[in-house]
Amino acid sequence: MGFIEPRSFIKKSGDSFTIRTALPEDAEKVLSYSRKIISEAPYLLTTEAEFNITCEQEKQFLKQKYDGEGKLAIIAEYQSNIIGFLDFHNGHKERIQHQGSFGMSVTDKYRKQGIGKAMLTVLLAWAKENDVIEKVCLEVFAENTEAISLYKKFGFVEEGRKVKAIKVEANKYYDLISMALFTK
């Protein structure tokens, strides 16, 4: 089951925020957060024009994460506002169920405040306690050096590089770095 007990953390500014499970009833807030983050974050795959998820689809997505044995969706909340989101899903076939990947984002205003570190701490604690998950994977834009530094601090290692994997405009590409951490 993709559930965690809510946990409080302290931002670098001294204010506390909460990490908790994203529930189906959070769908509208998560959609609003997603629209905002897509418009401001340079290292996401989805463009504003491509993002057309309905509230009902988001509810189903969050329900699948909650109900799934190797799935998790969490939000970072500050003063009832979502400031970060992370979702993890494992493989759908028996031979790859032991591993999964995650995507994570933090709103521009709250970056470099420990939000990503807190969400990663919660994810990895959940993964270590999960009977199915043995390996946590991610892909990150090679230019996103701050994120790469954070992942390395947690013990993630580079497994490979996809050259020119992301095309942002004519003749402008980014490499993707694959990283992983074994939890067992």
Image: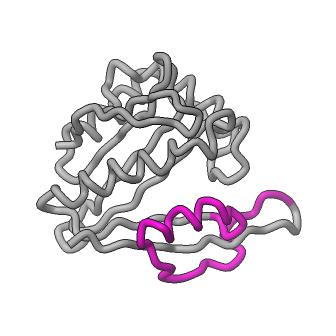
The residue drawn where x is 34% and y is 65% is 136
65 left or right of 56? left
Can you name the residue that lies furthest to the left here? 131
- Position of the N terminus by quadrant: top left
Q: Looking at the image, which is closer to me, 26 or 15?
A: 15
Within the magenta stretch, is there residue 143? yes
Instruction: Find residue 98 and report its horizontal and vertical position in percent.
Output: 22, 68
Evaluate whether residue 21 shows in this view.
no
Residue 20: image quadrant is: top left
Q: Looking at the image, which is closer to me, 42 or 12?
A: 12
- Position of the C terminus by quadrant: bottom left
In the rendered view, would you say 160 is above or below 100?
below
Q: Looking at the image, which is closer to me, 27 or 148?
A: 148
Can you name the residue that lies furthest to the bottom here? 160
Instruction: Find residue 107 and report its horizontal and vertical position in percent.
Output: 62, 36
In the rendered view, would you say 44 is above or below 5?
below
The residue drawn where x is 50% and y is 71% is 152
Evaluate whether residue 13 shows in this view.
yes
In the rendered view, would you say 94 is above or below 127?
below
Instruction: Find residue 163 and report its horizontal and vertical position in percent.
Output: 68, 79
Residue 49: image quadrant is: top right
In the rendered view, would you say 28 is above or below 70?
above
Can you name the residue that lies furthest to the front here? 14
Residue 16: image quadrant is: top left
Q: Looking at the image, which is closer to me, 110 or 84?
A: 110
17 left or right of 39? left
The residue drawn where x is 46% and y is 17% is 80
184 left or right of 100? left
177 left or right of 66? right
Within the magenta stretch, is there residue 153? yes
Q: Which residues are magenta?
A: 141-169
The residue drawn where x is 39% and y is 21% is 26
